[in-house]
Image: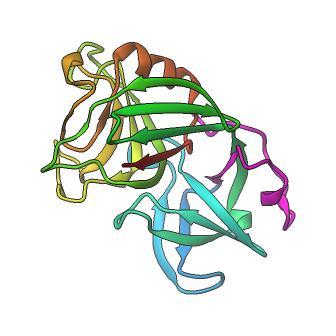
Amino acid sequence: MTAGGCALGGTSDAMTRVSSGYSYVALAIGHDLAVHRSPGGPVMTHLSNPNSFNDPLVLLATARAGDWIKVMLPIRPNGATGYVPANAVQLRWTPWKVEVDLSAHRLVLYDAGKATFHTPVAVGASATPTPRGTFYITTLLRQPDPNGAYGPYAFGLSGYSPVLKHFAGGPGEIGLHGTDEPWSIGHSETHGCIRVGNHVITMLAAQLPLGTPVVVHA
């Protein structure tokens, strides 16, 4: 799955021409993307394209400074940002946004700023909470067993568990996925991931592109 929306030009006002109901996604062009601490500043990290799940490297773009794009990074700590050269990415936009209310155990899907769907969710238990903040979809994994623990699909998100540095062979990355425990939905029982019904994750997998923002709040 690739980032959705229309490709945008490289003019300095490109990030101001789309209404507030849309978000910008930066799709890496090359195999290695150098991320700088500031426009033209020292390199803070390198990101591989494709990513570790063999999906295209996409980053949620938040601002533009001349020939530099400020992006959110899929690394620890949560909320980390950096700058990439505008000529190293292709800017696209997406109308989709996912909002998760931890207290209400509720997910709301927005299309161009309008709520179009809502569903109950399971979220992190008190000892393994789901982190709050703005994240985005980094990968989509079709599960080998649609009736397994993650349901038919699992989205990987750019956020990480605040307490688990390693989980199930991975670095503690937060996911949005289906479940084989539908009775857990509506409760705080997960290791930090967000669970939805299998019919819901199937619908979301067909609609949401990589880079879709996922906002988690209390």
Residue 3 in magenta?
A: yes
Direction from residue 8 to residue 105 in the image, left or right: left
Q: What residue appears at the point 63 percent right and 58 percent down from the top-left corner? A: 61
* Residue 116 image offset from top left, x and y in percent: 61, 24
Q: What residue appears at the point 72 percent right and 69 percent down from the top-left corner? A: 64
Q: Nearer the viewer, residue 135 or 6?
A: 135
* Residue 172 image offset from top left, x and y in percent: 24, 51
* Residue 44 image offset from top left, x and y in percent: 46, 78
Answer above or below: position of 211 versus 119.
Answer: below
Q: Which residues are magenta?
A: 1-28
> Can you name the residue that lies furthest to the bottom here?
41
Direction from residue 201 to residue 5 in the image, left or right: right
> Can you name the residue that lies furthest to the left here?
127
Direction from residue 103 to residue 210 in the image, left or right: right
In which quadrant of the rendered view does residue 177 lie?
top left
Answer above or below: position of 88 versus 39.
Answer: above
Direction from residue 40 to residue 196 in the image, left or right: left
Give the total number of marks visible in the rendering: 0
Q: Main secondary structure of the magenta part?
A: loop
Colour mapping used in the image: rainbow
Residue 8 in magenta?
A: yes
Quadrant where the N terminus sits is: top right
